[in-house]
Image (cartoon, rainbow, N blue to C red):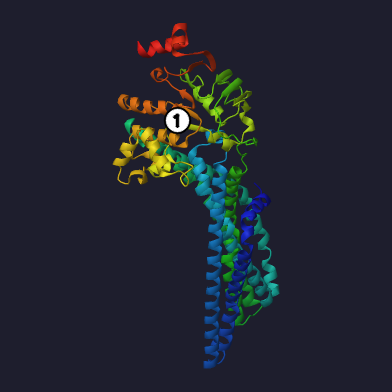
Amino acid sequence: MGYKNFISRLFFYLKPHIIKLVFTSLTIILATALESSIPEVTGRIIDDLFIGDRNQQTAIFYAGLLLVIIILSSLFSLTSTATSSWVSNKVIMDLRSDMFAKLIKLPKAYFDQHPTGKILSKLTYDVEQIASAASTMWLSFVKSFVFVVILIGYLFYKSWALSLSLIVFFPLMFLAVKLSSNRMRNASKQVQQSMGNMTHLLDENISGNSLIKIYNAQHQESNKFGNLIKNIRQQRFKVDMTGALNVAFVNTLIGLSLSGVVYFSAIYLKMSAGDFLSYFTAMGMLIKPAKSLININKPLQTAMAAGESVFGLMDEKLEENTGRKQLNNAKGAIQFKQVCFGYAEDNLVLNNINLDIKAGNTVAIVGSTGSGKTTIIQLLAKFYSPNSGSITIDGTDINHFDLSSLRAQIAFVDQHVRLFNDSVKGNIALGQTNTMSNEKIENAAKVANAYEFIQALGAQFDAEIGEDGVKLSGGQRQRLAIARAIAKDSPILILDEATSALDSATEKQVQTAIDKMQKNRTTIIIAHRLSTVQKADKIVVLHQGKIVEQGTHQDLLDANGEYASLYKYQFD
């Protein structure tokens, strides 16, 4: 990402605050102008007060003038800092808001390809780096630039000949900045990538803490983390050293110029004590803003590297939603016609799937691990699109439906139960917390056999369940997920190993609840345990991405094929 592109993207977020930025710039200029007058005032004090007559009125005048300059300069600086901070934090908020809004609209394939930690790093670390460019860096730049311009002008006013001889040092400073820019940006990119890797590793270790302990993998994970943070340290050291070399070079140039001022002003120009002090003080005051202008390259390169990461996310293609037709009150007749699909183009997961599910029927999809059972569900919910073929609901291709209306017709219970760090009520009424009645929530809990354990919780339906339901047992989490599907009351119900975490007694109770829930709904059951699918209207057997058998439980046993083999394996 080049300077021009970065600035134009950033300006989009700064544009609404342009008046505040102009105001900030004006207050900085005023504060800087006042501070820049100090060398001249100091020189006058030396000549008029200490070398000339020590007059009381003169002393009071200069003392008061200095006090006014310092107080006004401090007030203007405080005002500019406060306004700049407000803009910076507003830009951070707006960027994060837009990134999150974008993130939840990205296709599932994006999350399959990008580790969670790296995505989190974009919204935390990278955004902060950009925000520093938004206002803090702007504040520093304006202040330093104005300081440099005023002080250089003042130096020329005091002695144009001496100041002209010092101009030779500026091209050398510019060259040093230019040579270090690419090195800083590349190192900053590596730091940001490593920060993403670190966030990902932390996420894995926190969420998988029990697994790491049971396998005694603490040492292994500590080594991985140690190598990663060592890499980050080395990359940051490279950035810091590049900046430090710049500063050292500039300091050398400044030292040469100050030495020259002392020699020539004393021997050739024969300045008065006050004029020399004014000139030398201005030169001394010029050092800090000159360094700031040079050092500003370091956070700018970091911000630009972060900009590639953040704006790269913002430029990702949204999940396709070309359908305009609303799907309301679906009957639930589903057809897969010659559907082929592969997560990679050269590796089909599903091959020529033809499946007819009648409205209100229960269809079970069984098969060995990796046969493509869950992929069928992913396609029906349009998380992915088939490579070829079509999927219809009530005779209409699902590509014609608006995604929200399509998914509103589907309730889903996954084998990997996902709960949110919210109340029991918030999890059951997911997506409808402000509209779903308490009665409907409680009825859903009763049908899912979750009402009893919810009542035992301290705050009952208002009880917080922790991150991913950590305060609940596995069976309780699964029943809560089932209650969520019941509460949604959609005409199509998908159960992907919905009772896998339940003991036998609880499974029977929940299975009874599921049987009630299936009435007047089209239900698709993904199952490994064949005991849960024997009552299905149709059982579809998948093998290596192809449908090899379909029929009732008894028909498939009589056929003595793949299903019969699976059944015998489980029950013999």
Q: Camera-side residue: 139 or 360?
A: 360
Q: Residue at x 47, y 8 (%)?
A: 561
**Which amino acid lies under the numbered mark 1 shown in the image of this protein?**
Asp
Please give the residue where the numbered disc 1 appears in the rendered image.
Answer: 414
Looking at the picture, does residue 525 appear above or below residue 325? Answer: above
Q: Is residue 29 left or right of residue 509?
A: right
Q: Camera-side residue: 196 or 433?
A: 433
Q: Is residue 146 visible?
A: yes
Residue 239: x %, y % from top left:
54, 50
Could you tell me which quadrant the C terminus lies in?
Answer: top left
Residue 1: x %, y % from top left:
64, 46
Residue 372: x %, y % from top left:
51, 21
Q: Camera-side residue: 147 or 199?
A: 199
Residue 448: x %, y % from top left:
38, 33
Q: Is residue 410 left or right of residue 290?
A: left
Q: Secondary structure at mark 1?
A: loop
Looking at the picture, does residue 39 appear above or below residue 388? Answer: below
Looking at the picture, does residue 282 appear above or below residue 333? Answer: below
Q: Is residue 55 visible?
A: no
Q: Camera-side residue: 275 or 523?
A: 523
Looking at the picture, does residue 30 appear above or below residue 501? Answer: below
Q: Residues within 10 Å of mark 1 (few under 14, many from 20)?
A: some
